[in-house]
Image (spheres, rainbow, N blue to C red):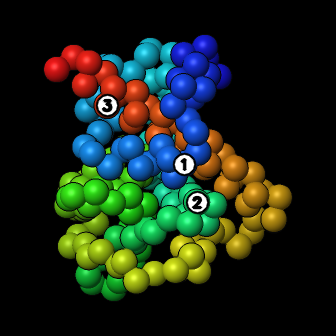
Amino acid sequence: MGRFAAMTRRRHWKGAMSALECLKTERVSLLEQHEHIPAALRIEVDRIIDRYAHGDCHIFTSAAAERHEMNFVILRQVDGQVPVHSCLAVGGSPCLYLDAYGLDTIESIKARYADYGTLYVDDDSDLDDLGFMFSPNKDDEDEKQEREDALEALQTVIVLIATLQNLRRTNV
């Protein structure tokens, strides 16, 4: 972990819930703000987005929802109800959702995955509904490591969102 990341985590990361509480105020897209992220962290951000927004969002969502008792939603295709994406419901007005891309409205997140067809928001799911997306070929140790990796990614995303929000406020 780079010096900036370690310093930022010490300064902003007091636990997921307290960090998330302060994030409810405005949307932040890590892609849109990519140029404001320190160069040393851009590769890490790209890796997190590639993994947890395009394939392992269920791990990211379930690990955070379980550890921090957070609500989540699953975006499903209207035709066939196939799950396409999952994200954490953070709250605020309008309600914001957290995934590997950052903090956004549900409409923006649905638009990001529009290539999968018409989507609806399933907000009546439980963690078991995310569990079926896990590979049956993984043992408990592999799954535990995946969840720890996802929680580390969550921490990185939250710290970057808080940092970018602070930059916005100081540059206004």
Measuring from the top left, give residue 50's x and y in whole percent. Answer: 46, 43
Residue at 66% across, 68% down: 135
Q: For residue 137, what is the image quadrant?
A: bottom right
User: Which amino acid, mark 2?
Assistant: His
Real-space CA distance between mark 2 and mark 3, rounded to the nearest whole angstrom: 22 Å
Cβ atoms under marks 2 and 3 closer than 8 Å: no
What residue sits right under mark 1 in the picture?
Answer: 16
The answer to which of 166 and 119 lies nearer the viewer is 166
Cβ atoms under marks 2 and 1 closer than 8 Å: yes
- Vertical position of residue 8 compared to residue 130: above or below: above
Real-space CA distance between mark 2 and mark 1, rounded to the nearest whole angstrom: 7 Å
Q: Earlier in the sequence, mark 2 or mark 3?
A: 2
Q: Earlier in the sequence, mark 3 or mark 1?
A: 1
Other residues around mark 2 within 10 Å, as few (<14) / some (14–19) / many (≥20): few
Residue at 26% across, 81% down: 78
Measuring from the top left, give residue 45's x and y in whole percent. Answer: 47, 32
Q: For residue 105, what is the image quadrant?
A: bottom left
